[in-house]
Each structure stands twice: as structure tokens, then as C-alpha cells.
Amino acid sequence: MTPEAAIDILKEVVTFTIYICAPFLLLLLTVGLIISLLQSIVSIQEQTLTFVPMIFIFAEVSIALAPWAIRNMTQFATEMITRMGSSG
């Protein structure tokens, strides 16, 4: 495998990782921001009020997006294995 091919594969892996993680991270960021705003409005500074809803939201989103994520990861893994096998 040439260095250029290895760099190309690494770029695709990093891009794909961002593609898979982005929906989870953006949703949790939004939920955290909303909860922080609500906490500052009502002057409640309890740390568990931030983490407990985020855990439940993450679990629900994980269940909802599991078919999409598994399908994409399977396609990506198949593509990468095929590319690595054909390159050398």
C-alpha cells in the first residue's frame, strides 16, 4: 500500500467517524444547552439535572438511529476491506 493510499483511507475513516457521531453530538449539545438555560432561568444548579436527561436522550437516539448507523458502518467496512484487499 502506498503512503498516498494510506492517507486517503485515513481521511475517509476520520470523515466517516464524524458523519456517524455528528447526529448524536449535535442532539446532546442542543439538549445540554436547553437544560443549562432552564437551570439558569430558575436558578437551580443541580448537576444531575444535566446528565440524567442527556443519558435518556442518548439512549432513545441510539435506538432510533441504530439501523441507520449499522447499515452505514457495514457498507463502509465492506468498502474499506475491498479497497485494502485490492491494493495489495
Image (cartoon, helix red, strand yellow):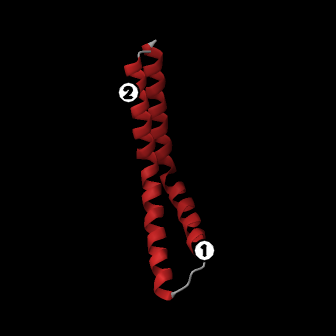
Q: Which mark is residue 8?
A: 2
The front one of 59 and 38 is: 38
Decide: marks 1, 2 in contact (CB < 8 A)?
no
The front one of 21 and 62 is: 21
Percent x, y for residue 30?
Answer: 43, 66
At label 2, the amino acid type is Asp
The residue at 62%/73% (across/down) is: 48
At label 1, the amino acid type is Gln
The residue at 58%/64% (across/down) is: 55
User: Taking 25 as reference, is 86 above or below it?
Assistant: above
Quadrant for the N terminus, please.
Answer: top left
Find the residue positioned furthest to the top.
Answer: 88
Mark before the other along the chain sequence, 1 or 2: 2
The answer to which image quadrant residue 12 occupies is top left
Q: Which mark is residue 79?
A: none
Crowd rating for badge 2 (residues with CA inside 10 Å; few <14, some 14–19, many 20+)? few
Percent x, y for residue 80?
Answer: 45, 26
User: Taking 20 as reference, is 4 above or below it?
Assistant: above
User: Taking 35 as reference, is 42 above or below it?
Assistant: below
The residue at 50%/88% (across/down) is: 42
Percent x, y for residue 66?
Answer: 51, 49
The front one of 2 and 21 is: 2
Pointer 1 residue: 47
Distance CA(mark 1)–CA(mark 2): 42 Å
The residue at 56%/72% (across/down) is: 50
Q: Judging from the image, what secondary structure is the residue with disc 2 in?
A: helix
